[in-house]
Image (cartoon, rainbow, N blue to C red):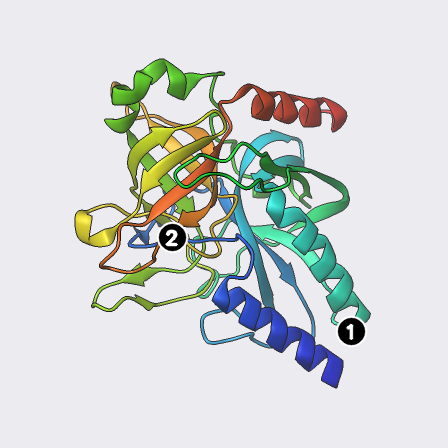
Amino acid sequence: MMTRTTRHLITAATVCFMLSVGVSHAIVWGVPDGNNHPNVGALFVKFDPVFSLGPGVPAGVFPVCSGSVIAKSSNRALFLTAGHCIEPLINLVAALGAEGLNPVAVVSFSGNLHQDPGIAIPVDMGALHWQLGQVPTTAVGALPSFDDIGIVVLQAGDAADLPEAVTLPHQGLLDALGASGYRESEIRVVGFGDDITEPTPHTRVRVFGIREVAYPRPVNLGEKYLVAQQHGPSGSSGAYFGDSGGPVFWVDPATGSETVVAIVTGPVGGLQNTKSTIAQHYRIDAAFALAFIEQVKSSEGF
């Protein structure tokens, strides 16, 4: 039986998720991705006894973030996500466990959790790595300079359940394009979060569980963050609640191949059809991010 405390926990958490308290975000103006990015997964907490947090959330699923496989060895994999996803994951497992809901942190690579939950691959809660800097006060229009990167270790029952890794960038890939080259690039964002579509005014058609792809318009580069426009009426799309940690791909114009150059951090500005919405995402082609990834690979034996 669900206790009053549990009901309050679930209700409060659902409200926080729906109102996006914090910086966890998801796809806007995107389209279903199908199996085009099988190495992009949904990070969530399974719980039992099973019930649904709301009509847009699969039963037994407490959403956390999105992410992608960046390395695998036998039946283990490294899953890249945002740094700000890790502490909520830890707290959520602890809180649900205290209520007797048997929580297990997992990642699924199913493209639609509502239709097929897929194979829930457990997260090793003893192998969590993250770097999250204090958000500084910056001038309007200034790019942030703090770090926001996390990696968790997945432990699959069968190595065949793990997808192949995404392609990581070389250091300074985006800088080498130059400002005009970056703005002319095609970038793609993939994640499992909310969707906003027509008609006006916008409506959220789901909350969590369908892998979607979006096509933001590159705008600017900072030392640690890239900026992109995501404004449906102008022909661009991007990230929203639930997509934090999902990959931002740069598309090679010569080959069409994709390289992960950033991870979703979140939008700034009005999320309305009548306003241009700008998103800032943490670059992983920057020196610190690549060094962090290599350090985790080494410490975890990858």
Camera-side residue of 294 and 235: 235
Hey, what amino acid is under mark 1? Glu
Q: Earlier in the sequence, mark 1 or mark 2?
A: 2
Q: Residue furthest front?
A: 139
Q: Quadrant of the N terminus?
A: bottom right
In the rendered structure, find residue 27 and report the number of the disc placed on it: 2
131 sits left or right of 223 in the view: right
Helix, strand or loop status at disc 1:
loop
At x 30% / y 47%, what residue is drawn? Answer: 230
Residue 79 vs 33, above or below: the answer is above
Q: Quadrant of the C terminus?
A: top right
Residue 59 in view of the camera? no
Q: Position of residue 4 (x, y in %)?
A: 73, 85
Camera-side residue of 17 and 296: 17
Camera-side residue of 283 and 163: 283
Q: Position of residue 86 (x, y in %)?
A: 66, 47
Helix, strand or loop status at disc 2:
loop
Q: Residue furthest top?
A: 176
Residue 268 in view of the camera? yes
